Amino acid sequence: MTAVAAHAGGGLADHIHPEPQGFIRKYVFSIDHKIIGIQYMITAFLFMILGGMLAELIRVQLMKASGGLMTPETYNEVYSVHGSTMVWLVIIPLLTGGFGNLIFPVQIGARDVAFPWLNMLSFWLFPPAGLMLYASFLMGAPTAGWTEYPPMSLNAYGAHDGTSMWAAAIFLIGVSSTMTGINFLVTILKMRAPGMTFTRMPLFVWGQFVTAPLLMIATTALGAALAALFVQRQFGVAFFDPTRGGSPLLWQHMFWFYSHPAVYIMILPAFGMISEILPTFSRKPIFGYKMIAFSSCAIAILGFMVWAHHMFTSGLAPALQLPFMVLTMLIAIPTGVKIFSWVTTLWGGVIHMTTAMLFAIGFLATFTLGGITGVFLAAVPFDLHAHGTYFIVAHLHYVLVGGSLMGILAGLFYWYPKMSGRLMNEKLGKWAFWLFFIGFNGTFLPMHWLGMWGQPRRVAVYDPQFQAWNQVASWFSFVMTAALILVLFNALWSMRNGKRSGPNPWNARTLEWQIPSPMPYYNFKHVPSVFAAPYDFAEPLPYRGLEEELT
């Protein structure tokens, strides 16, 4: 029975596949989208612990201008693997494979994703790829940063076998992401409940819907670049060697054609999370539903047109710099539309300051600042000054930590009841938020002026005039780490000791909250019908056919 045919039926017998029996089939090699989502989340959080440990090694190294903890080469290995971990093993898997698998099929009224076995394969490519990346330390890890620019990733200093291992690991993750994108796109196009039109879909589903083509299209460019780097390193084919007809700039074009859309792969699902949390805890309809949904499409399209703004310092022709500068500034408009809609949603609402809401509001503050500095960097003269400095480090972390990770933490506290049937401890959660918010800003805000004063990034030792602010950043990074440890403790403790949540502790209106918590294997006893968007709290629930779900 195909996934689409199974979905068309109304009874439990029409579920795509029978519920598996036994621990291995149920929790290890599972084809249930909810279990796979939790597998992604657990694995990604484990890799976040490893990547966070590497981040703290970086901050300890930079406590003193003269360094001392690591040699420069070891330092290069540490920050290269740290960056690769956070992008490919933490942020993207959590937002797409994790929360995407867990939540959006239920939000559209589906009983599973379109291709459950492909979904399982997508996950099981992920842990081996992560282990391959960390195994690169055994043979000399990559030393040219998460971007691995040739010729640095090809010359004697970067010629460790670990760099080839890095290329193979990221290629494998790309295969996994591509399969996930195909699966999600088909699921949203073909398996929505009756009446679930595009303008009735929850905004988290819109985030996944727009992200799926990015996973499919952009990742192919990265895969080709990684394959070329691997083949050159292992077999000597001169793709990036200018002395033999190759070009190092070819890598940059291919890498950034993926990696700038990848920024939106790492933020569009988080936008969807925020768009679910703010109206729920404001008790107001989301302001500008269609503007938020369609601006995501605009961001995705423009995201493919701005890659070369990462290459202003590479000798890009001035005639090309201007259009890329203008297009990069234009992409701030649809993002600004979202921020305006979110703030207007809060205006006049009955605000419930739950932990999820605190993280969502914190997201608004930190991501907006990251977006503003992004507009600065879109200007060619400013980028030429700041490109090799800590200003870039600050901007990147305000977008990916203050944006993506803050959204992930908001989503964790919001949807934890759907995973476990229990609530996370709100008191511990609020302590974690304030520690994280203060620690994050104390760590990365000083890097803006360190960059403006000229501290270069990617160096193990630096001018002593920058030492005081680096020490401030390092001490605050320990506070941020303590906050994340507190979140992890809260999640583990609440799994057995948290207050039972019931099906809908937040009085939310999307479909996942209308079924038991934790969610049953089959999702819905009968596939519901939808007759309105889910955000008008003054109206009855816009669903039919849910009468038996909680009985």
Image: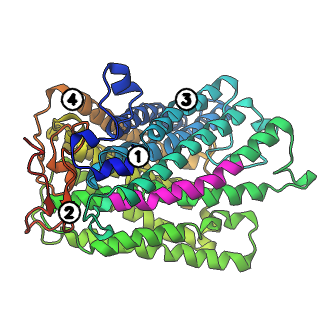
Q: Check disc 1 and give the amino acid type.
A: Thr
In the image, 281 versus 189, the foreground residue is 189
Answer above or below: position of 151 versus 271: above
Quarter assignment of residue 532: bottom left
Circle on res. 495: 4
Predominant secondary structure, magenta span? helix
Q: For the magenta stretch, what is the residue range?
A: 205-225
Circles 2 and 3, Cβ within 8 Å, touching? The answer is no
Q: Residue 130: image x %, image y %?
A: 54, 32
Q: Check disc 2 and give the amino acid type.
A: Val
Q: Count of labels shown?
A: 4
Q: Earlier in the sequence, mark 4 or mark 1?
A: 1
The residue that mark 1 highlights is 2
Q: Earlier in the sequence, mark 3 or mark 4?
A: 3
Q: Nearer the viewer, mark 2 or mark 3?
A: 2
The residue that mark 3 highlights is 128
Distance CA(mark 4)–CA(mark 1): 35 Å
Q: Earlier in the sequence, mark 1 or mark 3?
A: 1
Q: Earlier in the sequence, mark 2 or mark 3?
A: 3
Asked whether, in this view, residue 138 is left or right of residue 127, the answer is right
Q: Nearer the viewer, mark 2 or mark 4?
A: 2
Question: Does any portion of residue 451 appear in the rendered image?
Answer: no
Distance CA(mark 2)–CA(mark 1): 23 Å
Distance CA(mark 1)–CA(mark 3): 30 Å
Question: Does any portion of residue 312 appear in the rendered image?
Answer: yes
Q: Residue at x 79, y 41 (%)?
A: 231
Membership of 222 in magenta stretch? yes
Q: Nearer the viewer, mark 2 or mark 1?
A: 1
Distance CA(mark 2)–CA(mark 3): 41 Å
Q: Secondary structure at mark 3?
A: helix
